[in-house]
Image (tube, rainbow, N blue to C red):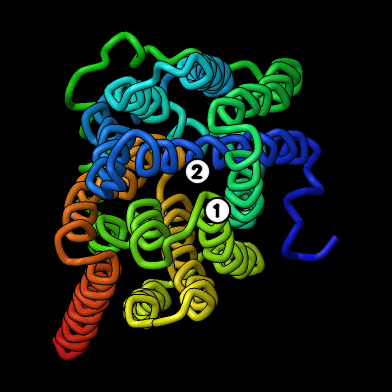
Amino acid sequence: MSKTFRSLANPNYRLWFGGAVISNIGTWLQRTAQDWLVIAELSDKNASAVGLVVFLQFAPQILLLPITGWTADRMDRRKLLFITQCLMAGLALILGLLVLSGHVVLWQVCACAFALGCVAAFDAPARHAFVSDIVSEKELSNAVGLNSVSFNSARLVGPAIAGLLIASVGSGWVFMINVLSFIPLLLALNRFKKRLPAVVSDNSKATPDMTKFLEGFRYIWQHREMAVILVMSFLICSLGMNFSVYLSAMTVHVFQGHADQYGFLISMMAIGSISGAMVTASRRSSPSFRFMIYVAVMFAVSCFLVAISTSFWAFAVLLILLGLSLQLFTTSTTSYMQVATEKRYRGRVMAVVLATALGSTALGAPLVGWVADALGARWAIGMGSLSGMMAALLGFWFLRRQVQTESKDKTL
């Protein structure tokens, strides 16, 4: 087996990977259908409405951060994931029934999005940390990269299928198909019950105080390079990750397109994302800090090129570059943070990392939606270029400061 897929030699990871691929496809089916339902059917082609739904779906990543990281470290992650997956399937079922009934309104979609965000806030850090329970430390960086390959392969396939399904059978059935996509992962988690060692009880479970909640923040603050990477992630994700807002706005306002074209644009971006995840998975070591600075520059340039592209096909092709740079940065950040963190703190640190990425996406979504409505979708994309350049400048500043500090230490 090639070094890119070496983690799949682990039977436990193979079982997890197979269930996750199908579940991720269902996730992207629902995300695409939800965005299109909001902008095309429940609002007057309003990008701000999409931004509101995105905000509600990702805001719980910040609101529940003190609890989610602690839970991921103290609970049996397999049981926690089984519960969260069941709840997310139930919410997809509720939304599907609402749409199929023909009486769905925007506030109901917002409520389901917020509830889904609350569940996902517990699911995400547990899901990322769970990988370290089923692979060795040597396999961890590769497994993280392959997780991104799984997620972004689903982002390539899911939106394209969703666009065709929305046009043929409607959004409601897309949500119902997502309900079925949870079954393989739930079966895999059930099989893990006999495969994984029993969880050792921890007396600290009995004292979930605020000190423990904040240990993830404290750990990152004590490692200043990790803190800088976290700020860079906030800058890039707050504006650049809101592609559902600016791509839906570009589709309906600039290109006068439909659901199939919206799904196609997300899939084109996913091609680049898969490439970025494959690059990360093929690396034998964790990405360096300098590498992430260069990727931030690449992201800024790609955002600018996408924003000024004039034709639909030029726009679509350049989205590959944007997806590549964005995925290289986010996957490298996740890999770096996991490898650099002591295992006993990993759940709490990953909760902070994920909350920063998804929480900043939530905070940026209303702003991106407002800019798209007020100034145009191209300006909303251009804001991502500005945030990427700010992140790169911060990284260069910190790197230069490190070099100067090391030089002073040598002269002493």
Separation of marks 1 and 2 at Cα, in angstroms: 7 Å
- Labels 1 & 2 near each other (Cβ < 8 A): yes
Point out the image quarter for the C terminus.
bottom left
According to the image, label 1 marks what residue? 263
Residue 59 as seen in the image, left or right of residue 344? left
Residue 236 as seen in the image, left or right of residue 281? left
State which quadrant residue 184 falls in. Answer: top right
Measuring from the top left, give residue 191's x and y in whole percent: 75, 19
Tag 1, which secondary structure? Answer: helix
Q: Compared with residue 286, is residue 191 higher up or lower down, i.e. above or below?
A: above
**Residue 232, labelled with which disc?**
none
* Residue 185 shows in the view: yes
Q: Amino acid at mark 2?
A: Thr
Measuring from the top left, give residue 114's x and y in whole percent: 31, 26
Mark 2: few/some/many CA within 10 Å (<14, 14-19, 20+): many
Measuring from the top left, give residue 267's x and y in whole percent: 58, 59
Question: Who's the residue at 35% across and 35% down the image?
Answer: 348
Q: Compared with residue 399, is residue 193 higher up or lower down, i.e. above or below?
A: above
Question: Who's the residue at 46% across and 28% down the image?
Answer: 123
According to the image, label 2 marks what residue? 32
Specify which label sits upstream in the sequence, 1 or 2: 2
